[in-house]
Image (tube, rainbow, N blue to C red):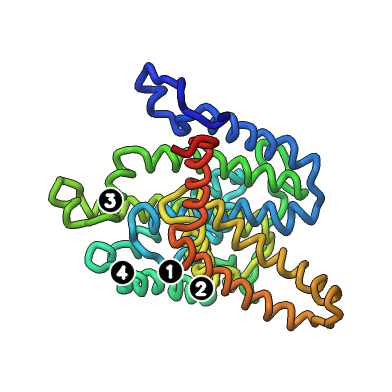
């Protein structure tokens, strides 16, 4: 009875084109954002920020970028880790080589470098698709691994290949403790998610979805496949590059090329598949599933072992965590192939009719 659109009349085009058409959705999202900015910093502890919330926010941003390319445009990619690496190392070089370079412009420039890199490796999408495109984008991963490991200029001539940053600040506000890092990542995520939501609702977003559904029919009705595909690679790579800079600067602090391996690319792809392809909300669900579930299993399995009187070693818990994690992924893909976002949408639809399902 409380979640109904009855009586919520739209009298202008502006009100009819709102992101959240139902007032309850707007109030819920505003309350959630307010709680994330005001309530969580007062209630959370250091472990919650460092181990869960900050990586969740950054991975949500990366999954958002992957969803633009894979979910909305239908171009499969296995090179997301490479785009994150380009964003991280480009931001690092801008930050350390240009005296007085502010943090946010360095991150934006790193995202633009990732955009150029993504467009370069997105060119094969004009000729191939499916598994062939996946292999072509996987080449970006191998190339970035070689480039950042062998070309010492990118690591500021570091002998070990490991680089680090310190003294981060925005407008004189230091980004050092767990709460400032969390708020900084949350602010960028909210802004980019809002812009992405509006972008996928615009004309270019509809072009992406037309290419995803049937590229030949889209070309027949006047959509330019080259522009649509390369623009999706550009936007996706920029968002992923920004998330890579945040992952390196804010979460890791010190990193090496192995931090952006092919495993990270697969994790990002799993996030959008489990969360829901072509859904902004699905990016958050998928990131929460990938980030939070392993930590929860790592904490739960030893407790379960002590309860059952079984001594579960650290190695056994780690292997069991991987097996359970993989089994849950397969289970979700079988039970709900459209991802967790579909379950969320179904629940909202049932609430619209409750308690009169007719």
Cα distance, mark 3 to mark 1?
A: 19 Å
- Residues marked 4 and 3 touching at CB (< 8 Å): no
Image spot of residue 129 (x, y percent): 28, 67
For label 4, the SS is: loop
Which residue is tagged 2? 262
Observer-nearest of 25 and 137: 25
Residue 55: image quadrant is bottom right
Q: Which of marks 4 and 3 is nearer the N terminus?
A: 4
Which residue is tagged 3? 228
Image spot of residue 127 (x, y percent): 22, 66
Which residue is tagged 1? 78
Image spot of residue 102 (x, y percent): 60, 43
Q: Residue furthest top?
A: 11
Labelled disc at residue 130: 4
What quarter of the picture does the N terminus occupy? top right
- Residues marked 1 and 2 touching at CB (< 8 Å): yes
Q: Earlier in the sequence, mark 3 or mark 2?
A: 3
């Amino acid at each position: 009875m409380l979640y109904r659109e009855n009586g919520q009349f739209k009298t202008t085009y502006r009100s009819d084109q709102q992101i959240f058409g139902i007032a309850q959705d707007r109030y819920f999202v505003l309350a959630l954002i307010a709680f994330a900015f005001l309530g969580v910093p007062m209630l959370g502890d250091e472990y919650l920020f460092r181990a869960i919330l900050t990586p969740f926010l950054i991975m949500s941003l990366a999954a958002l970028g992957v969803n633009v390319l894979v979910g909305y445009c239908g171009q499969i990619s296995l090179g997301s880790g490479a785009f994150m690496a380009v964003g991280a190392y480009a931001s690092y070089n801008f930050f350390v080589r240009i005296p007085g370079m502010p943090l946010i412009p360095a991150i934006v420039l790193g995202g633009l470098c990732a955009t150029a890199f993504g467009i370069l490796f997105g060119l094969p999408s004009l000729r191939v698709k499916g598994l062939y495109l996946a292999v072509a984008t996987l080449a970006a991963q191998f190339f970035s691994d070689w480039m950042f490991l062998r070309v010492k200029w990118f690591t500021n001539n570091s002998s070990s290949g490991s680089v680090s940053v310190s003294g981060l600040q925005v407008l004189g506000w230091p980004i050092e403790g767990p709460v400032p890092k969390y708020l900084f990542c949350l602010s960028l995520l909210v802004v980019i998610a809002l812009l992405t939501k509006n972008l996928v609702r615009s004309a270019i977003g509809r072009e992406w979805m037309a290419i995803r559904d049937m590229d030949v029919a889209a070309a027949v009705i006047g959509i330019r496949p080259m522009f649509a595909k390369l623009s999706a690679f550009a936007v996706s790579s920029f968002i992923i590059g920004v998330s890579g800079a945040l992952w390196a600067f804010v979460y890791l602090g010190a990193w090496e090329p192995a931090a952006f391996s092919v495993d990270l690319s697969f994790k990002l792809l799993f996030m959008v598949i489990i969360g829901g392809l072509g859904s902004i909300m699905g990016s958050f669900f998928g990131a929460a599933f990938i980030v939070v579930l392993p930590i929860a299993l790592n904490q739960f399995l030893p407790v379960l072992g002590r309860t059952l009187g079984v001594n579960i070693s650290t190695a056994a818990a780690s292997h069991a965590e991987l097996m359970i994690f993989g089994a849950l992924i397969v289970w979700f893909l079988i039970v709900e192939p459209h991802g967790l976002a579909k379950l969320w949408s179904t629940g909202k639809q049932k609430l619209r009719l409750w308690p009169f399902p007719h």
